[in-house]
Amino acid sequence: MLGTIISYPDALAAIGSTLNPDWFGDPGCRAFAEAALRLHREGHRVSAATLIAAVSPAVERDGLTRAQFLARVVSMAMPLSMLSGPLSTLENRWARRIVAREAEQLAADAVAIDADPHEAVAASLAAFDEVTQAKGERAAASISECTNALLERIATGVAARARQRGLEALTLN
């Protein structure tokens, strides 16, 4: 996913409103995704050079510089037409990490004598709300896109019919 964002300048225009940096489990990937989205929102062209400049050297680890990390990531880029599946997978893995984390915490709180079970459930529900909110936002965006496309098709159809009727009126005269 990150390699595609860097390799294709139009990628963020297509998925920037959907992509959430928190979906990246790896802190390095998350830092680069945050920087890419920030640069995109500020109107900058996202490239390997701008990302290297925008991300702190503190993300360098495992003997990889930021440039080496991005070179590896770019080598895994996929065509824009193939982004929907990996984007959904990325979001699903993020949601599963939250569910697993909260399940572990609830199990620990359930047997802890000093933990308030009501507070434990409330904290987990807040985390689950984050997951359902992301799903709801995506559905709302999808409904909005469908509505706009429908209105555009209606307007296009009305204009085409008007042109046709205008031509018919000219031929009758």
Image (cartoon, rainbow, N blue to C red):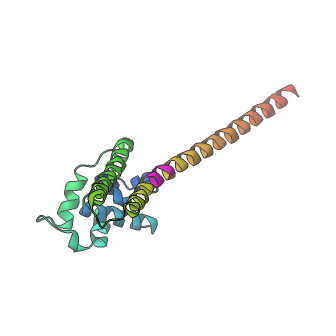
Q: Quadrant of residue 28?
A: bottom left
Q: Is residue 160 left or right of residue 114?
A: right
Magenta-span inclusion, residue 168: no
Q: Nearer the viewer, residue 36 or 89?
A: 89
Residue in the picture at 45% in, 51% down: 132
Furthest toward the right, the residue is 173
Q: Nearer the viewer, residue 93 or 168?
A: 93
Residue 45 visible here: no
Residue in the picture at 20% in, 65% down: 67
Q: How many marks?
A: 0
Q: Position of residue 94 (x, y in %)?
A: 33, 53
Q: Nearer the viewer, residue 28 or 93?
A: 93
Residue in the picture at 25% in, 63% down: 27
Q: Is residue 149 left or right of residue 135?
A: right
Magenta-span inclusion, residue 134: yes
When the figure is inspected, residue 143 is found, relative to residue 60, above or below; the finding is: above
Q: Nearer the viewer, residue 154 or 127?
A: 127
Furthest toward the front, the residue is 113
Furthest toward the left, the residue is 63
Q: Quadrant of residue 78?
A: top left
Q: Is residue 102 left or right of residue 155?
A: left
Give the dominant element type of the magenta stretch: helix, strand or loop.
helix
When the figure is inspected, residue 121 is found, relative to residue 96, above or below; the finding is: below
Quarter of the rendering occupied by the C terminus: top right
Q: Position of residue 83 (x, y in %)?
A: 36, 45
Q: Position of residue 26 (x, y in %)?
A: 24, 59
Residue 62 visible here: yes
Residue in the picture at 15% in, 67% down: 61
Q: Which residues are magenta?
A: 132-136
Q: Position of residue 141 (x, y in %)?
A: 53, 50
